[in-house]
Amino acid sequence: MSEAMLSKVRKLLAQAEDPACTPAESAAFTAKATELIARYGVDRALLAVRDPTTDPVGDRVLDIVAPYARDKVGLLAAVAEPLRCRCVRRRQGNGFAVHLFGFASDLERVDLLFTSLLVQAAHGLAATAVPADDHPAAFRRSWLAGFAEVIWGRLWAAETAAAGESGGPSVALMLADRSDRVQRRLTEEYPRLRTAPARRLGGTGFGSGAEAGNRAHLGGRGLDGSRAGRQLDR
């Protein structure tokens, strides 16, 4: 992400996170930051049509550590899919190594958002009391599932709006082609990939996690996921 764009996003998020901000003001700042991140993705895709060397298909591996490693992977997938990236989960010790595939600009955006959202999820969980009749781990897993599902929907909406404002059907087709190219790259690397079975969660935290997802700031302050990992590990 360009320094100018990143600076704008950081300023908006700093304003949104200011304790003096009203909920309405915070939501407005957050919406603008989300819009800029989505628009950046479309702009980079359009530039790559003219010069493919500016935004090649690539991959990277992120280490996702316990506790709640599987739930963190779910959040990563919820960020990656709307941003036209794909991920493969591989067991690694008591956590996972997640192999991400996507265009360079989209991988950058996933890193940025996932790092921020892990921190925000950690703060949200810390501020949410576990009901007396629920198991703490089950509650937190369902909370994280609700958080991830809402984030997924918000990102899809932002990406769809950015594509529509930038050129309508022709841009949508171009972005779909980019998604297909990423999928082909993944298939080349993992030709016998199997889909993991759906999880069944028993906790009661889904609703409060979803509410936190609606309040989350869709941006971040760095590309290094280590800070976020430490926050959720507490």
Image (cartoon, rainbow, N blue to C red):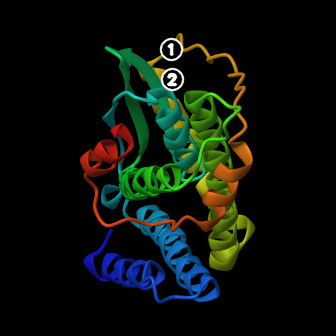
Counting from the top left corner in percent of width and height, residue 216 is at 55, 64
Identify which residue is drawn at 64% across, 86% down.
24
Q: Residue furthest front?
A: 132
Q: Which image quadrant for residue 50?
A: bottom left
- Image quadrant holding the N terminus, namely bottom left
Q: CA distance from mark 2 to mark 1?
A: 5 Å
Identify which residue is drawn at 54% across, 53% down.
83
Which mark, residue 53? none
**Nearer to us in this view, 77 or 122:** 122
Counting from the top left corner in percent of width and height, residue 136 is at 57, 32
Q: Which image quadrant for residue 112?
A: bottom left
**Nearer to us in this view, 179 or 128:** 128
Q: Residues within 10 Å of mark 1 (few under 14, many from 20)?
A: few
> What residue is shown with label 1?
191
Above or below residue 175? Residue 28 is: below
Disc 1 is placed on an element classified as: loop
Identify which residue is drawn at 30% across, 83% down.
4
Disc 2 is placed on an element classified as: helix
Q: Which image quadrant for residue 2?
A: bottom left
Quick check: 156 left or right of 77?
A: right
Residue type for callout 1? Pro
Residue type for callout 2? Thr
Quick check: 165 left or right of 125?
A: right
> What residue is shown with label 2?
187
- Look at the numbered discs 2 and 1 and tell me whether their residues touch, using CB distance below 8 Å: yes
Q: Residues within 10 Å of mark 2 (few under 14, many from 20)?
A: few
Q: Residue furthest top?
A: 192
